Image: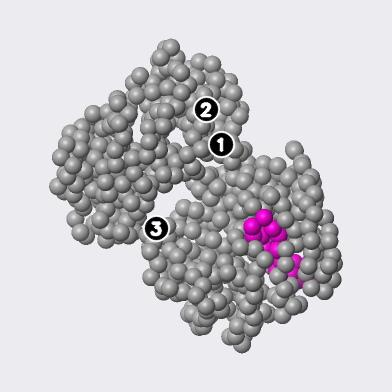
Amino acid sequence: MMKLALIALCAFTLAGVFSAMADELQFENLGVPVTIRELSFRFVSQHPDGGHIAWSHYQGDDRRAVVGVRTDTGVTTWVDVGRYGSTNIRYTATDEGQVYIYTGKPGHFLRHDPTSGETTDLGVPGKPASYWMHDATGPDGVWYVGTYPRTYLMACDLKTGEIRNLGKMAEDGRERYITRVAVSDDNVIYCAVGLHHRELWAYDARSGEKHQILPDEMTEPQGAPSVWTGTDGKVYGRAGSTRFQCRPDGIVVGETLAERRDPDAFRAGEYAVGAIDNQGKLRLTNTETKEASFVQTDYEGRAVNIYSVACEREGKVYGGTVFPGKPFSCDTQTGELSYLGDLAPGAIQIYDIIDHPKGLFLASYMGCKLDVYDPDSPIERGVNPHRITSSIKGHERPNQWEKGPDGKLYFGTYPAKGRLGGALVQVDPETLTFKTWPNIVTDQSIPYLTAIPETGELLGCATVGGGSSAVPSQKEACVFLWDIETEKVVWTCKPIEGARTYLRAIRTPDGLVYGVVPEGFWVIDPEKRQVVATGELPVKTLRFPVLADAPVGPRGLIVGLGDDAVFAIDPADNSATVLGRHESIARAHGFCVSRDGALYYGSGANLWRCELPLDR
């Protein structure tokens, strides 16, 4: 395991013993906790020399690319696309082996020639376009991609390289996403739109006419329909439990067929192409004998970015990654990193982990996935870890766990895409059941909670923002108190005039609560229902999750990260000062302070550690 010690000279200007004192903070790169060697493929194309290339994509901390792997030699080809901007990647290939790519901010169409190795930028068909989920190719060889945030339908002719913007599908400004695209054999493109509510648009490539074809009663629910091209060349869909056939002017409920699959999409001569395993070996299966063989590749895997560094349990710090959400641990004595495997199946990112005698409770995106894992017991599928729920209806992002005064676990949510009004969620760690209170603060999400044991309440920090693409209805956010016994909001306040987001808040031993907004910090007395102080922060851009879980060190400092700095608020005099700076903090995401006073944080795919001067 690589360790790299870096020294950063920092000036300390905290009041009292910190004043006029300079010290050296040691920042240590502990390494990469999670590297995924496995690689699955989207399709196989034939190289002009007769060989075959299996294609996938790579979105890592170090590069963004479409990657091709020769099925005969295992040698990789990298089509780097990072210079066009960080967003997702869609790609397809022609029968002649040309690879077309759509990526970037705004989206660029690219064409890669495997023979020459050259990549041509075909241009930007329309702005803004910065995110896309799906694509499809029509019978005339035109490739279609649905985009965010204007529901533009983009097109690229795979024969000529001509690109076009076919226009905005949705006419309701609350709709931002084309989630799926399917094309019928008579060249009608069907665009599933959401996620504020369901819509389904039919675009006729011959006439340019478009129509929203779902009946009104099917457009009301939140989400988006699904569409696919059936085995007969017609397009079929599903909205909720209702299946139907799509037509240019409407749908026929009850008619459905299975999705058409290309039998040669993963074919390389006499072999069916599988995936690369955790040893970097590509699996090939003879289509006649069914015998498997393996080709060693030079693919080295992808280091996965850290999203959360969440809690400490029995001498280990636990955290999770993003795209995909995988958990890891770090031994606080040795610095040893361990990848823990698939403890939150299907997670895209692990938002938070909280330690409890019953185990580690994980909260993940999408859909508020909740899992509990006992690190003292063996892993057993379906038992340990145990899935509490795969989703909380209408909600997506479980930002931060908090143990309530009643011993139960709580978190607030951001709602589903396009919607306003988060929920308060309670999880009983004994029964592993959960309860939800939606929209307890009108049209505001609840990113952070703080327990107030003196009054049996939870203090919530709200934001006017909602699910992705939602348009806020409120001008100001608030802080509120929730009475656990009566299950009601009993008090609200706005400590910072005009603030639209209240971030994390921490209770001090004397019962005061310190919280932050992007513009500064505030202090309230929750028992007296009073704002007692406000102040400025020495940083501008705050790093998730903004503040450490609790006051740290003998002085009870409120420690956070922002810009490229570690900062602290001293409750003794409400001064806020930078403790130290390091370039890695400029990319920090996820951090916690261990019981021995060490700061652990993610920076890209690496876990860093810094001993804080909290005992002086």
In the orientation shown, which residue stands out farthest toward the top? Answer: 49
Question: Which of the 4 image quarters holds residue 95?
Answer: top left
* Residue under the image location 83 percent in, 67 percent down: 20
Q: Could you tell whether 274 is left or right of 565 in the image? A: left
Residue density around tag 3, few if under 14, some if 14–19, many if 20 or more, within 10 Å = many
* Residue under the image location 72 percent in, 63 percent down: 578
Residue 341 seen in the figure: no
For the C terminus, the quadrant is: bottom right
* Amino acid type of the residue tagged 1 in the rendering: Arg
| Extent of the magenta region | 552-569
Residue 74 seen in the figure: yes
Q: Nearer the viewer, residue 113 or 281?
A: 113
Residue density around tag 2, few if under 14, some if 14–19, many if 20 or more, within 10 Å = some
Whether residue 450 is in magenta: the answer is no
Assess whether mark 2 and mark 3 are in contact (beta carbons under 8 angstroms). Answer: no
Q: Position of residue 424 (x, y in %)?
A: 49, 69
Q: Considering the numbered disc 2 on the image, is that residue within a helix, a strand or a loop?
A: strand
- The circle drawn on residue 469 is 3
What is the spatial separation of the Cα atoms under label 1 and label 3, in whole angstroms? 27 Å
- The circle drawn on residue 78 is 2
Whether residue 566 is in magenta: the answer is yes
Q: Nearer the viewer, residue 410 or 209?
A: 209
Closer to the N terminus: mark 1 or mark 2? 1
Q: Considering the numbered disc 3 on the image, is that residue within a helix, a strand or a loop?
A: loop
Assess whether mark 2 and mark 1 are in contact (beta carbons under 8 angstroms). Answer: yes
Q: Nearer the viewer, residue 325 or 555?
A: 555
Residue receiving disc 1: 63
* Amino acid type of the residue tagged 2 in the rendering: Trp
Residue density around tag 1, few if under 14, some if 14–19, many if 20 or more, within 10 Å = some
